[in-house]
Image (cartoon, rainbow, N blue to C red):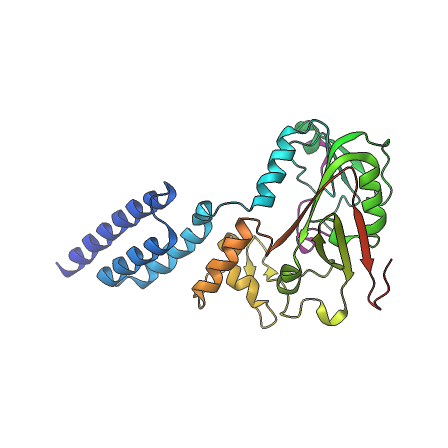
Amino acid sequence: MLKLAIILEQEKACFLVKVILLSVLNGKYHSEVLHLKMKQFINHFSMKQLWKKLTLHLSQHIHHEWEFSREWQILQEKLNTSKRIIDLGCGANPHPRASIGVDAFLEPVHRALGHGPKIETTHFHSKGVQFIQAELENLPFADKKFDFAYSHHAFEHLPNPQKACAEMIRIAQAGAIITPSFFAEIAFGRPYHLWFVFARGNNLFFIRKKESEDRPFGEHPIAKVGGGYKVVTQTNPFDILLNDKGWYKGIERMPRLSQLLRKYWYSHSPIIEVIFLWQNSFNCVVILEDGHII
């Protein structure tokens, strides 16, 4: 009888979990109300393991309630209204609105710490996108050929971003350069990211990172064979706190900080991303490690 009672309680709990999840995914509850209801639920059923799994699931879905940043919304409008779009540094997944994708590397040398997918030209062709292998500093296109040049997390990799900016201006009427923010580069930096990037007005600044500024909080989690990541002593705690896509299965020790990180991350906030939009032209300023400005 006791075992039967436990099973019934668990079935009841699972039903309530489904009801709450559906309410969340339908936008009924905001985060504060949701957390209060879930705490009340857990206090009633004393099911810590279920709470752990549920919060992990919610961390992957609840970000729909965070409104995208103004910069990101403007960017989407530009992409939706432009006709001839080129994706510079497209990796294996070009923007769906682009007709041409450009990347220097077929292998994931600078993508996902070397674990990203290889660029397959047949995959591009199936999407109606032409792939061109070229350096962004030397683009094989005529002047002002494109309405909009889009680049998502590529310019922070480049040894000569100033030349790449000049090429972008040359081939397009307008465009967008998206990079990690200063904070994101400190907190989540990658070994192949060479620059801190920030924007003011019509000026885009690239500041060369010093060795002491490169990944000061540790390394990205190590990829496991078969998928997922594992935590070691050198694992960056910010990656654990962010827990993007729910890879970390441990206890969430700082839920407020984790929630803020995910809010800024999924909303494309300026706290996490530089979204630099330009029309006709812009100024690129490069500051080298010794302070020399070019």
Quarter of the image with the C terminus in it: bottom right
Q: Does 98 sit left or right of 166 as displayed?
A: left
Residue 115 locus on image (x, y percent) = 66, 52
Q: Is residue 120 magenta?
A: yes
Kindly identify the residue that appears in the image at 57 percent across and 40 percent down: 73
Kindly identify the residue that appears in the image at 63 percent across and 39 percent down: 75
User: Farthest residue in the front direction?
Assistant: 201
Count every numbered label the image shows and give the total: 0
The answer to whether 273 is drawn above or below residue 148 in the figure is below
Kindly identify the residue that appears in the image at 76 percent across and 50 percent down: 203
Q: Which secondary structure is most common in the magenta stretch?
A: loop
Kindly identify the residue that appears in the image at 60 percent across and 53 percent down: 270
Residue 65 locus on image (x, y percent) = 44, 46
Residue 282 image-quadrant placement: top right
The part of the chain drawn in magenta is 110-122
The answer to whether 147 is drawn above or below residue 150 in the figure is above
Quarter of the image with the N terminus in it: bottom left
Residue 219 image-quadrant placement: bottom right
Q: Is residue 13 magenta?
A: no
Asked if residue 77 can be seen in this view, the reply is yes
Asked if residue 96 can be seen in this view, the reply is no
The answer to whether 79 is drawn above or below residue 163 in the figure is above
Residue 246 locus on image (x, y percent) = 48, 55
Q: Does 294 sit left or right of 88 as displayed?
A: right
Q: Does 26 sit left or right of 151 as displayed?
A: left
Residue 26 locus on image (x, y percent) = 36, 40
User: Farthest residue in the left direction?
Assistant: 1
